[in-house]
Image (spheres, grey):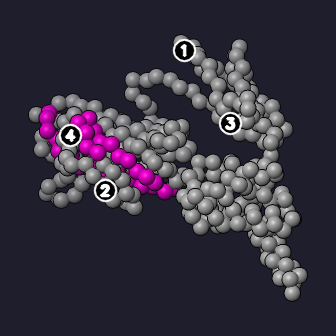
Amino acid sequence: MGDTFHNQLLHQLESIRQLAISDSSNGVRWKAFSNSDDLDRQDEEAVARIAEAFESSGKSGDIIQGIVKWLLKTRNEHAWTTTKSTAAIIGLLQTPEVPSVPHQLTANVEDSVLSVTDDLFSGRTADFRNIYGKKFPSQILVSAGSPTPVSGNIKYYYFSSIPPVDSLNAIVQVHKDMYKYDNPSGKWEPINDNTSLQIADKIKTVLTIKTTRQLNYVFINERRAATMEPQEIESGYKYEDDLEYYQSVKDAGYLFFVDKIPSGIHSISYETVISASGNFTNGPASLQCMYQPSVNTYSNTSYVIVNP
């Protein structure tokens, strides 16, 4: 009887293996887990149980290696939600099957060499070269120092009086639009360079956030023009466009704190009133993930002209 049940379990485990997606770059995963923006509690424990089942069967040891590679490459920013799942994943990462060959990248920048590696004891995940006062190198040669596939990136930091629109950001983009309330029609009309603004006009500002993946613990610093006084002066939690966030009203603008922004297009809006005449600059809104500072972007800027 025991052999019958054992054979049935092995047959079912083989069915699970055939449903897996496997490649040398991202490891082994299943659509039910990999297609979601983030794992929930059930997914976390299910991944650990699947790995445990393959380990107990004594077969398909490469499945465990593939699962570990998938966790390290595509789920390295995930925060485990329960102590049970955290302990299970830590145990999985400590298995002997985890590849121990360190990865290395080398970049030749003019007369300097930048080198990074993920070696556990002597690794350095970032290297820096100061080229202040010089032009950006026309050519950078990057080579891998390990036989296995490895990925990396080169970042160029520079100073500017007005941060540019980060249209090349592949993860997240923010765009700012302003609307003027038209009393006769009762509608919000887009503001452009030809829009005539007067004192006491009602303005709605909309921040449109477009992201290709889920963002966690997001901080948005919105800088408004000096003539735009907030209609709502109290800070507090808001719910808009499937987003729950905390809005903090400051003298120079608004601060927004969002626990989670799912992939897709979402918006945050607020209303202000024109309080003074003159020419004003509506500064850019900056977005950054607090626990992943590399994910950041700026919105567009605009000028506000208010007639006397």
User: What residue did someone put label 2 on?
Assistant: 238
Element marked by disc 3: loop
Amino acid found under the numbered disc labelled 2? Lys
Marks 1/2: CA–CA distance: 43 Å
Span of residues in magenta: 248-277
Name which of mark 1 and mark 3 comes first in the sequence: 1
Residue at x 59% of width, y 30% of height: 155
Is 281 left, or right, of 299 in this rendering?
left
Name which of mark 3 and mark 2 comes first in the sequence: 3
Name which of mark 4 and mark 2 comes first in the sequence: 4
Q: Toward which corner of the image does residue 19 lie, by quadrant?
A: bottom right
Q: Is disc 1 surrounded by few (<14), some (14 to 19) or many (20+) residues within 10 Å?
A: few
Q: Marks 4 and 2: CB-CB under 8 Å?
A: no
User: Does the magenta segment cover residue 202?
Assistant: no
Amino acid found under the numbered disc labelled 3? Gly
Looking at the figure, which quarter contains the C terminus? Answer: top left
Residue at x 43% of width, y 49% of height: 209
Element marked by disc 4: strand
User: Does the magenta segment cover residue 273?
Assistant: yes
Looking at the figure, which quarter contains the N terminus? Answer: bottom right
Name which of mark 4 and mark 3 comes first in the sequence: 3
The one of 162 and 87 positioned closer to us in this rendering = 87
